[in-house]
Structures are given as structure tokens and as C-alpha cells.
């Protein structure tokens, strides 16, 4: 037998229970906006050009650090304006270091009612390389920092670099988290087993909800890794969205997430393509539930037991 994670069993797409999102929708759409801060002259970070993490030049890596910082100073504000223009909510995936680095940006998202979800301290590090005690301390410090800044305690978590240790789901549930975005293994939420005595929100069943977070409808792998152009990325979002809506006749409720990073999608020439894609998707707004990841979690808790694979 191959080693298994033992978090959930295989469950085929066909034959699943039929239920709906609010207003009878069969597709829930959410935007995940990554607000990230990086350590200068050290650590990890996405790269526009070869840098220290990919065999390029030494630290300090001015080019890539400044490119990422552009997202916090300019790109994120362009994206905020677009969200306002299209009346779209967002789930903000927040490095807690942003609370000190760019408090005005975090406050602007909170003021419009966006959800703040935990995203570690900084994307200059991975929690998957930490000892259990260190990882637990990271989760607690990141979580309490958001609360201490006057915002609601986050209900959801995306690990920096989507990197988990063997005990990350357990630590998240023990810290009170209701859902995780780390796994992209399904198109609907899935319960994951944990060792926790509670479920993160007092459910008492030792589990945490896994909500789909995209690894393809995501500007980092699409634009940075695969070198797709802005219009290619936009076309991919529309095709993904329309194909899912065309499949709703099977009656299975789905989740579509869109992952955005302001230093990538917030470049002016890419914003134009994103605006067009989102506007086209919203022409069918009446057929979908436009929401946050936290709202997806809350709705799942209202469903009869057995509605969600586990």
C-alpha cells in the first residue's frame, strides 16, 4: 500500500448529494486577493527575473523585491478600485506583516467588508519546514496580530507557498480555524479529518473544511510560471467560469476561486484584461453566488450532515 495522508478518502464526482448555494445557485465564486510582504535581502519570493532563489544574482535582490512591493504600493489599489467598480467582495489572504507594513491597505479592504483570512506572517518563509512548536507559534502569532489590529479573528487560512507540514491541518483546527484553502483536490468543499477535539468553530467533530483554492486560475502559475499573457489568463478565467455553469445540469454544487496577486495582476496592462473577464462573468451574476470563502464555510455548516464529502 502507498502511504496516505488519512485526511479524507477518495470520493468520485458522480453520485454526490445534490444541494444548492444561496438563491438556488450551483456555482459559488470567490476572489482570493493575496496581500503579501517579504523580507528585504533574504528569504523566499516570487521572481520576475532569475534571482537568488532560482540561481540568479545574490542578495539583496532589488529587482524582484521592488516588483513585489509595487503590488502593495500601486497594484493593490488599482485592484481595489476594480472590485468597487464591479461590486465584488474579496477574501484577503493576509500576511500578518502587512498590518505594520501597509496598514492603510488592510484597512481599506476591511472598510469595504472584505474577509481577512490568515496567510502566515510573510511569504518569505514556509511553515512546512518548521518544527511543530514553531509552526504552532507562527499560526498563533499571525492570528492574534490580526485580532490585535482590531479585525475579526480569521476563520480561514492559506499557508505561505501553500506549504503544509504533516500536522498543519491539526494545528489549524486546534487554533480555532474553520477552513483551509491549501488543497486543490476537488471542486466542492471537503471535510478533512484532524486530531483536534473540536472543528475550529465548536462543531466538535475533529475536522476542518477544505475549500477549493485554484492552482490554475491563479496569476502566479499562469503568468509567472507558464508565461501566459494577460489576455490568455483572462480567457482562461472566462472559459473556466462558463464551462462550470454549463455543467450545472448535473446538480452538483461547485466552487470556483480566482487567485490574484497585486504585483502581478495589478500591472496596468493586465488590469484591462482582468476587468474584461470579470465583467463578462458578471453578465451571468444571477446564476452564481458571488461570495467570500468564509461565507462558503458558513453555508456548509447549515447543510445536513452527509452533504459534504469527508
Image (cartoon, rainbow, N blue to C red):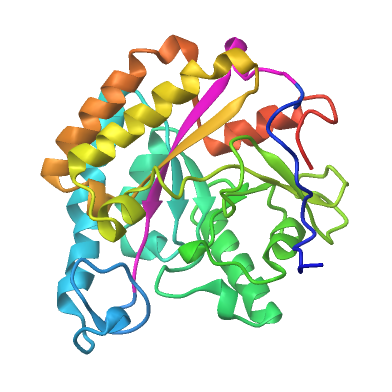
Give residue 223's position: percent from left, percent from top.
26, 52
198 lies above or below 68: above
Give residue 293's position: percent from left, percent from top.
55, 38
**Residue for point 43% across, 68% down:** 122
Q: Is residue 202 left or right of residue 164?
A: right
Magenta stretch, residue numbers: 18-38
265 lies above or below 254: below
Q: Is residue 68 left or right of residue 295?
A: left
Q: Is residue 289 visible?
A: no
- The answer to if 124 sits in the magenta stretch is no
95 lies above or below 90: below
**Residue for point 41% across, 66% down:** 97
Q: Quadrant of residue 72?
A: bottom left
Q: Residue furthest bottom?
A: 58
- The answer to if 23 sits in the magenta stretch is yes
Closest to the observer: 28 or 216?
Answer: 216
Q: Residue furthest front?
A: 1
Q: Is residue 199 visible?
A: yes
**Residue for point 63% across, 66% down:** 140
Instruction: Count the marks.
Output: 0
Q: Which of the image's four quarters has the N terminus?
A: bottom right
Q: Which of the image's four quarters has the C terminus?
A: top right
Give residue 29's position: percent from left, percent from top.
48, 29
242 lies above or below 112: above
Q: Is residue 156 left or right of residue 177?
A: left
Q: Quadrant of residue 234?
A: top left
Q: Is residue 201 left or right of residue 246?
A: right
Give residue 4's position: percent from left, percent from top.
76, 64
Amino acid at each position: 500500500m502507498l502511504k496516505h495522508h488519512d485526511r479524507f478518502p477518495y470520493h468520485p464526482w458522480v453520485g454526490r448529494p445534490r444541494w444548492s448555494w444561496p438563491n438556488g445557485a450551483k456555482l459559488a465564486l470567490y476572489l482570493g486577493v493575496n496581500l503579501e510582504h517579504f523580507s528585504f535581502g533574504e528569504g523566499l519570493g516570487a521572481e520576475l527575473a532569475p534571482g537568488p532563489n532560482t540561481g540568479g544574482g545574490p542578495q539583496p535582490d532589488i529587482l524582484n523585491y521592488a516588483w513585489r512591493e509595487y503590488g502593495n504600493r500601486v497594484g493593490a489599489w488599482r485592484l481595489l478600485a476594480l472590485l468597487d467598480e464591479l461590486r465584488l467582495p474579496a477574501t484577503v489572504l493576509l500576511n500578518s506583516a502587512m498590518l505594520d507594513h501597509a496598514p492603510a491597505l488592510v484597512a481599506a479592504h476591511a472598510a469595504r467588508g472584505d474577509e481577512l483570512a490568515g496567510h502566515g506572517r510573510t511569504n518569505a518563509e514556509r511553515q512546512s519546514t518548521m518544527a511543530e512548536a514553531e509552526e504552532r507559534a507562527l499560526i498563533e502569532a499571525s492570528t492574534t496580530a490580526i485580532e490585535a489590529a482590531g479585525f475579526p479573528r480569521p476563520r480561514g487560512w492559506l499557508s505561505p507557498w501553500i506549504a503544509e507540514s504533516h500536522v498543519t491541518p491539526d494545528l489549524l483546527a486546534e487554533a480555532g480555524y474553520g477552513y483551509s484553502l491549501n488543497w486543490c483536490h476537488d471542486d466542492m468543499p471537503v471535510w478533512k479529518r484532524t486530531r483536534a477535539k473540536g472543528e475550529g468553530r465548536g462543531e466538535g467533530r475533529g475536522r476542518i473544511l477544505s475549500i477549493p483554492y485554484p492552482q490554475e486560475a491563479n496569476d502566479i502559475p499562469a503568468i509567472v510560471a507558464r508565461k501566459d499573457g494577460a489576455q490568455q489568463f483572462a480567457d482562461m478565467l472566462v472559459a473556466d467560469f462558463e464551462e462550470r455553469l454549463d455543467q450545472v445540469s448535473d446538480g452538483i454544487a461547485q466552487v470556483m476561486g480566482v487567485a490574484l496577486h497585486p504585483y502581478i495582476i495589478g500591472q496596468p496592462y493586465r488590469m484591462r484584461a482582468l476587468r474584461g473577464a470579470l465583467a463578462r462573468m458578471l453578465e451571468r451574476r444571477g446564476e452564481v453566488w458571488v461570495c467570500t470563502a468564509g461565507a462558503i464555510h458558513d453555508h456548509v455548516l447549515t447543510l445536513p450532515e452527509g452533504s459534504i464529502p469527508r
